[in-house]
Image (tube, helix red, strand yellow):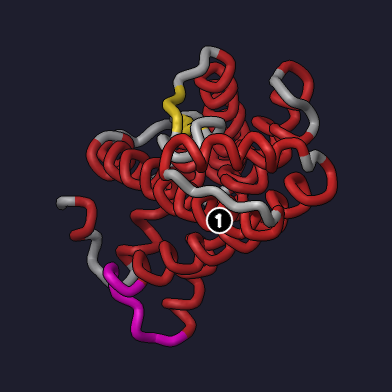
Amino acid sequence: MGKWSFQHDTFELVFAALCASLAVFLTLYKVVFAFPILPYLKFELAEIPVIIAFLVSGPFSGLLSSVIYWIILTLVGEWTPIGPAMKFLAVASTILGIWAGFVLSKRIRRNSFRLSMFLGIVLAIVIRLIITSLMNFLVLWWLFPFFLDIAAKYLSVTIGFKADSPSAILVVTLVFTAFFNILHLFLSLIPSYYLVSRIVARVKPIGLRGAWVKKILSETHSGKCFGE
C-alpha cells in the first residue's frame, strides 16, 4: 500500500508538471483563435492539458498544474503579470467549480452521473464568471482604462454598438467577456473529458488506478459514463 501511495503521489506531481509544460507550449506557440466580437479575447487550447490533469489524477494535480502554468507564463509569457494571473484564475476557478459540483452531488445523496456533471458545470461557470468578471472590471476600469477604448472600437466594428458612456461600454464588454468565458469553459472541458474517457481511462499508467473523475462518478453510476 505504501509503495502504491508513493507511486501515486509521484505520478500526480510528474503528470501535473507535464500537463503544465504542454499548456505553456500551446500558449507560447499561440495555438489560439480569436473571439469574433472582441478579438483581443483568445480561445486557447492551453487549458485542455490542465483540465486533463484534474480529470485524470484529481484536484491537487489539476490545481498544481495550473500553478506551474501560471508561474512559467509569468516568467516567459506576454503581458505579465496580469495576463498569466488572469489565465490562472480562469482555469483554477473552472477546476474548483467542477470539483465543488461533484462534492455537492455526493452530499445531497442524489448523485448520478448527470447530476454530478450538471452541478459541476454550473458551479464552474458561476465561479469562473464571478472571478473573471471581477478581474476584468479591475483591469478595464481601474488599472488599464485605455483597454476600454479598445473594447469600444471592437464593439462598434463587430456589432455596431456605440455609446458615449464609459460605464455602458464597460457593462457590454463584461457581458460579452462573460459569454466568451462560458464558451471557453466548454471548449476546454468537452475535449478534455473526451480524451480522458476514451483514451486515458483505458490506459493504466504506473501509480494510477484509473482516472480520478472515473472513480468519482462511478461511485454512484457504475462507471458507465466512460463507455464500459
Q: Residue at x 54, y 48 (%)?
A: 162
The stretch in magenta equals 108-115
> In the depicted view, which residue is nearer to us: 86 or 61?
86
> In the depicted view, which residue is nearer to us: 24 or 157?
157
Horizontally, residue 213 falls left or right of residue 71, namely left
Residue 75, position in %: x, y?
Answer: 78, 20
Residue 100, position in %: x, y?
Answer: 54, 68
Q: Which residue is mark 1?
A: 172
Horizontally, residue 209 falls left or right of residue 150, namely left
Q: Quadrant of residue 18?
A: top right
Most common secondary structure along the magenta stretch: loop
Q: Is residue 97 visible?
A: yes
> In the depicted view, which residue is nearer to us: 26 or 104?
26
50 in relation to 221, above or below: above
Q: Residue at x 70, y 20 (%)?
A: 77
Dot 1 amino acid type = Val
Element carrying mark 1: helix
Q: Quadrant of residue 208?
A: top left
7 in relation to 164, above or below: above
Crowding around mark 1 (Cα neighbors within 10 Å: few <14, some 14 to 19, many 20+) is some
Q: Residue at x 53, y 57 (%)?
A: 175
Q: Residue at x 58, y 43 (%)?
A: 61
- Tally of numbered discs: 1
> In the depicted view, which residue is nearer to us: 72 or 214?
72
Q: Is residue 48 magenta?
A: no
Q: Is residue 114 magenta?
A: yes
Residue 153, position in %: x, y?
Answer: 58, 36
Residue 72, position in %: x, y?
Answer: 72, 24
Horizontally, residue 139 falls left or right of residue 1, namely right
Residue lying at the far right in this picture: please name it. 143
Residue lying at the far left in this picture: please name it. 228
